[in-house]
Image (cartoon, rainbow, N blue to C red):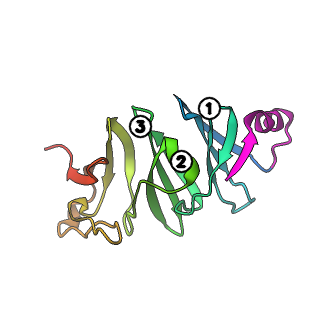
Amino acid sequence: MKRIPWTVLLLAAATGAAAEFPNLRRIAVDAPSCREIVVIGNVQGPPGRDLLALVDAAGNLVVPELPDELAAIDQALVSPGKDLLLSVSSGEGHQAVNLYRLAELAAGAPLSRVEPYPYSWSDIRWVGAGVVRFRAAGDYGKLDPATRRPAARPDMDDGEREWEWHVAADRFRAAGP
């Protein structure tokens, strides 16, 4: 884990010296353990790797080792209670969905992980405390506990369906009627 004073990164960006950090996405958190989530894009040059980082309570940029993240961080979504972070990353033609407790993000281990392969998630959002809604093909009601992948649906001609992930219970259910 690297701790970098956030002001150094901001100064580099302001002076144009941030060539190795051309893409920064900032997500305000304002929680006791985390001021902000920062996605640093394309760190190692094309076709680089994105880094998921946080600004801690002291104002330091903390870049944890997150081995479960794939090359591109597509989304970083903070829960309404500002205690959880859902990260959607992609690489090698598929997605990985990781759920972190913000207070433990610096440790690098996800609280939970889902491998949507061979499908993918879209329209991902928090819809309440501990509930993530998304659209995907596959049967998340039959998620394989070992691989964390959904089962194929026999009615795949119907395409995607909306699902809810109740993260505390680690349960999936079809959303809506």
Label 2: which secondary element: helix
Residue drawn 50% across the image and 57% down it: 109
Residue drawn 38% across the image and 45% down it: 123
Position above or below: 82 against 63: above
Position above or below: 117 against 65: below
What residue is shown with label 2? 105
Q: Amino acid at mark 2?
A: Leu
Q: Amino acid at mark 3?
A: Ser
Label 2 neighbour load within 10 Å: few <14, some 14-19, many 20+: many
Label 3 neighbour load within 10 Å: few <14, some 14-19, many 20+: many
- Asked if disc 2 and disc 3 are in contact, CB closer than 8 Å, the reply is no
Percent across and percent down for residue 47 are: 69, 63
Label 1 neighbour load within 10 Å: few <14, some 14-19, many 20+: some
Q: Would residue 155 be found to the left or right of residue 164 on screen?
A: left
Residue drawn 83% across the image and 38% down it: 12
Q: Would residue 69 be found to the left or right of residue 137 on screen?
A: right
Q: Nearer the viewer, mark 2 or mark 3?
A: 2
Q: Would residue 45 be found to the left or right of residue 41 on screen?
A: right
Q: Would residue 77 be found to the left or right of residue 128 on screen?
A: right
Percent across and percent down for residue 141 are: 20, 60
Percent across and percent down for residue 67 are: 57, 63
Residue furthest top as drawn: 30
Q: Amino acid at mark 1?
A: Ala
Label 1: which secondary element: loop
Q: Tell me where the magenta segment starts and ends, as one range.
A: 1-19
What residue is shown with label 3? 79
